[in-house]
Image (cartoon, rainbow, N blue to C red):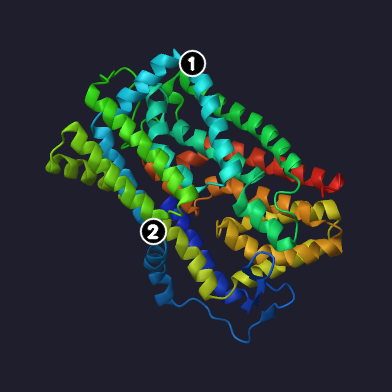
């Protein structure tokens, strides 16, 4: 009573405003660039921290560049966009056989209604996957089946993606054995691979306890009343079908296990066989066709299911390309390195603990513009390592500050292809609804990250 309702703009509006802001900055921020050199230890092209130079002339975004930035962003993000389109539509074919719902109901009967235990186990599982394998986009292959499971338990689509996002972000960010953050950063700054692992596993445990409490808190709200769902009443998003028991026939059992084997093989393909987004897209199309044939679907029926999946997911997929336009504008305007140079330089006048926290927040902020951990590591770590020597911050603390800043907001910022793709696959969940459900969690994770970095600096983590 008496409180004003805050309406978060549609994600299209948010991204377009960010594109316009990026274009304006190319007129205000002087163009500048770093030189890249080959790092012998890691074998990667990294920034020479002493090479920054301002360019004589700016390269501001023209009107033509502005209006073509979104199509250009879509072109650059085409593999991600097509993966989301094709996997979602392929899973729609499998879903229409009824095998997923029937198999999930059978599993829930075996668990005898231990819904909260299932949630805890799955959250920890995805946390371990993130911590050990360093998966981010790879988590997306699990979204359809986990969302189907939460719907079958009487919950909503948001909880399904939340289980993966909370567990995955904690594992990826604390990164005890994450080659994409811990491994690459330690290689660049010359630390032994996975050194300081005990500290990271302790962080993993502490953050995971908080994450599980958050996920269970949302689940309990839905236990009380499904109307507490942030997507309750939103048109076009699947509702709970817990009262609709689908018979687990022989054909559906075969389809269910073929799909499950397909998910496992896709995970092995990414981890062992070097599969990329295109491999995943084609593989899931093959799995869906095989499942349709096993269930006895005709070609026209499979095609109709596939088309319905495409129709549902296209509005969300476009966001992935739109978000990519922000980075295109900043890179073409040659202002990205200038912003990094200014931000890194601003940390030089702070006490060591405050500077370490500043590195963490700097990474979190830059994550808004480009989420790639390897890209940020290649640019930032060669700059931050010598800066740390001057400020009395050892490389191990810098790595911790970087990885905690890099991982969490990959599952929150509206410019992240990972979160947009995940929300799309989870059932076309609007980003503003996701933000409403998880904002507190990501704020808590950010504060905890700052505290963890401060502790690492105080104890002299090495």
Structural crowding at the residue carrying mark 2, measured as other residues with C-alpha within 10 Å and reported as few (<14), some (14–19) or many (≥20): some
In the figure, is residue 351 to the left or right of 180?
A: right
Q: Is residue 317 at all visible to an observer of this figure?
A: no
Q: Are marks 2 and 1 in contact (CB under 8 Å)?
A: no
User: Measured along the vertical axis of the image, is residue 110 above or below residue 156?
Assistant: above
Above or below, 82 against 234 in this view is below
450, above or below 156, in the image: below
The image quarter containing residue 290 is top left
* Residue 23: image location, x then y, percent: 51, 70
**In the image, farthest residue toward the bottom:** 56
CA separation in Å, label 2 and label 1:
39 Å
The quadrant holding residue 423 is top left
Q: Residue furthest top?
A: 112
396 relative position to 459: left or right = left
Percent across and percent down for residue 378 are 63, 65
Q: For residue 114, which numbered disc appears in the image? A: 1
Q: Please give left or right for residue 416 compared with residue 373 in the image.
A: left
Q: Nearer the viewer, residue 259 or 268?
A: 268
* Mark earlier in primary sequence (2, 1): 2
Q: Residue at x 54, y 81 (%)?
A: 59
Q: Secondary structure at mark 2?
A: helix
* Front residue of 246 and 192: 192
Q: Tell me if residue 158 can be seen.
A: yes
**Residue 363 in picture, x, y percent from top left:** 66, 56
User: Left or right: where does residue 49 sit relative to residue 175?
Assistant: right
Residue at the image point whose x is 28% and y is 34% from the top: 95
Q: Taking 92 as reference, is 376 above or below it?
A: below
**Extreme-front residue of the structure:** 272
Report the residue marked by disc 2. 79
**Quadrant into which the N terminus falls:** top right
Considering the numbered disc 1 on the image, is that residue within a helix, a strand or a loop?
loop
| Residue for point 36% across, 31% down | 233
């Amino acid at each position: 009573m008496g409180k004003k309702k805050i309406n978060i703009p549609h994600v299209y509006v948010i991204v377009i405003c960010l594109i316009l802001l990026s274009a304006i900055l190319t007129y205000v921020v002087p163009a500048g660039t770093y030189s890249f050199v080959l790092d012998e230890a890691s074998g990667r092209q990294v920034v020479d921290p002493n090479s920054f130079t301002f360019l004589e002339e700016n390269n501001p975004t023209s009107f033509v560049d502005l209006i073509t930035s979104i199509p250009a962003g879509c072109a650059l993000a085409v593999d991600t966009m097509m993966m989301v389109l094709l996997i979602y539509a392929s899973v729609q074919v499998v879903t229409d056989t009824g095998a997923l719902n029937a198999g999930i109901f059978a599993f829930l009967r075996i668990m005898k209604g231990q819904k909260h235990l299932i949630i805890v186990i799955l959250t920890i599982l995805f946390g371990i996957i993130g911590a050990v394998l360093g998966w981010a986009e790879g988590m997306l292959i699990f979204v359809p089946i986990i969302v189907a499971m939460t719907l079958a338990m009487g919950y909503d689509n948001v909880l399904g993606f939340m289980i993966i996002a909370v567990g995955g972000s904690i594992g990826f960010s604390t990164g005890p054995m994450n080659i994409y953050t811990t491994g690459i950063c330690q290689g660049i700054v010359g630390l032994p691979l996975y050194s300081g692992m005990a500290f990271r596993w302790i962080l993993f445990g502490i953050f995971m306890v908080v994450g599980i409490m958050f996920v269970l808190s949302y689940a309990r709200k839905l236990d009380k009343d499904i109307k507490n769902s942030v997507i309750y009443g939103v048109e076009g998003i699947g509702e709970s079908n817990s009262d609709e028991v689908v018979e687990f026939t022989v054909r559906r059992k075969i389809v269910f296990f073929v799909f499950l084997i397909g998910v496992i093989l896709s995970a092995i393909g990414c981890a062992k066989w070097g599969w990329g987004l295109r491999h995943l897209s084609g593989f899931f199309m093959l799995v869906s066709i095989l499942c349709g044939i096993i269930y006895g679907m005709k070609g026209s029926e499979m095609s109709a299911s596939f088309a319905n999946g495409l129709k549902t997911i296209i509005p969300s997929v476009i966001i992935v390309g739109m978000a990519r336009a922000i980075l295109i504008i900043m890179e073409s305007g040659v202002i990205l390195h200038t912003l990094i140079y200014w931000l890194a330089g601003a940390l030089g006048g702070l006490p060591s603990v405050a500077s370490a926290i500043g590195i963490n927040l700097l990474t979190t902020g830059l994550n808004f513009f480009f989420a790639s951990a390897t890209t940020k590591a290649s640019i930032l770590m060669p700059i931050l390592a010598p800066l740390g020597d001057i400020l009395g911050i050892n490389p191990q603390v810098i790595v911790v500050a970087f990885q905690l800043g890099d991982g969490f907001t990959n599952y929150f910022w509206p410019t992240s292809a990972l979160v947009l793709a995940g929300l799309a696959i989870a059932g076309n969940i609007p980003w503003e609804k996701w933000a409403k459900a998880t904002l507190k969690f990501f704020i808590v994770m950010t504060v905890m990250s700052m505290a963890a970095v401060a502790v690492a600096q105080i104890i002299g983590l090495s």
